[in-house]
Image (cartoon, rainbow, N blue to C red):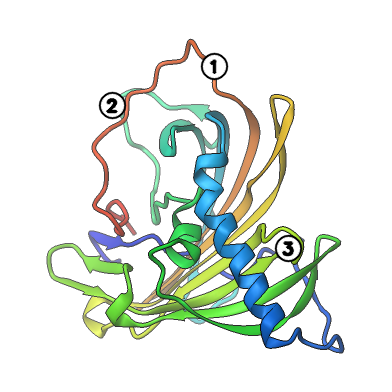
Amino acid sequence: MTPGLRLAFCWTGALLALAGTSLAFEAPPDSAEQDRLLTAMHQYADQYISSLPNFLCEQVTHQLEAGKRSNRWHKGDTLTTTLAFNRGREQRKLALVNGKPVEPGQIRWHRPLITEGEFGILLSRVLGAESHAYFTWSRWETLNGKRLAVFDYSVDQQHSTLTLSLSDLAKATVPYAGSVWGDPATGAVWRITDAATDIPPALLTQRISTTIDYGEVLIGEKKYLLPVEAAVSLLLETKKVRNEMEFQNYRKFDADSVITFGPDAPSGERPPQKP
């Protein structure tokens, strides 16, 4: 076990249900068209959070663990969380553990990996105005029936905002890389991934990676592109940990609802992890 693991927002490989089909024989766009596609994706990311309404949804997280060299995943707890998105900020409240209501003040479930930030943080970090990501063309790919442009990207250590820390013992800002899947007509991002690279041995973490898949969701009378599934994978020295998340039951934020936000986590860092 690795106690007190604290990791920055980071996301893992695509969920099998949403696997894409590479259009290997389709010619890549020329450099001018690649620039146009990237500009559209940057503009989309810049406006993404401000374009979203206030809403509520349920996040269902399936926790899995396996041995370091094993592909036999063992199911852990299933956590159902009420998620509120209000003026660009996220708040979560755990409601059910394995289908049973949570009693106040009691923690009786295993929490090997805790994540947050699916609603815009990764998009902003990679495609936002302050991003220093370097993009290269990858391929055309069909994902859920949509023909999308796929770019690979990387962020070097000098410009990285991704910080990993192990309790108070070690801390490092690390480079990362991933891919984005964008609509060639609108720049809308339908999938984004990242993976930390060059992680120092002192952090006892060999790999951490993320995938977020978006889908059209009706809130009120309008459709929005919002996370529908996500996965986070963590490879430690002795085991693998994976969270598979579903986002469902989106609805408009009730004007009579009251949400109190707790203290913000430091920018670029995750809350404490408890393997």
Give the mark, 2 or 3, whose residue is nearer the N terminus. Answer: 2
- Front-most of residues 138 and 92: 138
Residue appearing at x 23%, y 67% in the figure? 165
- Tell me if mark 3 has few (under 14), some (14-19) or many (20+) residues whose alpha carbon lies within 10 angstroms of its own: some
Q: Residue 121: name its quadrant.
A: bottom left
Residue appearing at x 82%, y 87% in the figure? 24
Residue 265, position as x, y percentages in the image? 26, 47
151 relative to 241, above or below? below
Check disc 3 and give the amino acid type: Asp
Residue at the spot of label 1 = 254
> Outermost residue toward the front?
32
Check disc 1 and give the amino acid type: Asp
Residue at the spot of label 2 = 105
Check disc 2 and give the amino acid type: Gly
Residue 253, position as x, y percentages in the image? 54, 22
Residue appearing at x 26%, y 83% in the figure? 200
Q: CA distance from mark 1 to mark 3?
A: 32 Å
Residue 35, position as x, y percentages in the image? 63, 77
- Front-most of residues 267 and 80: 267
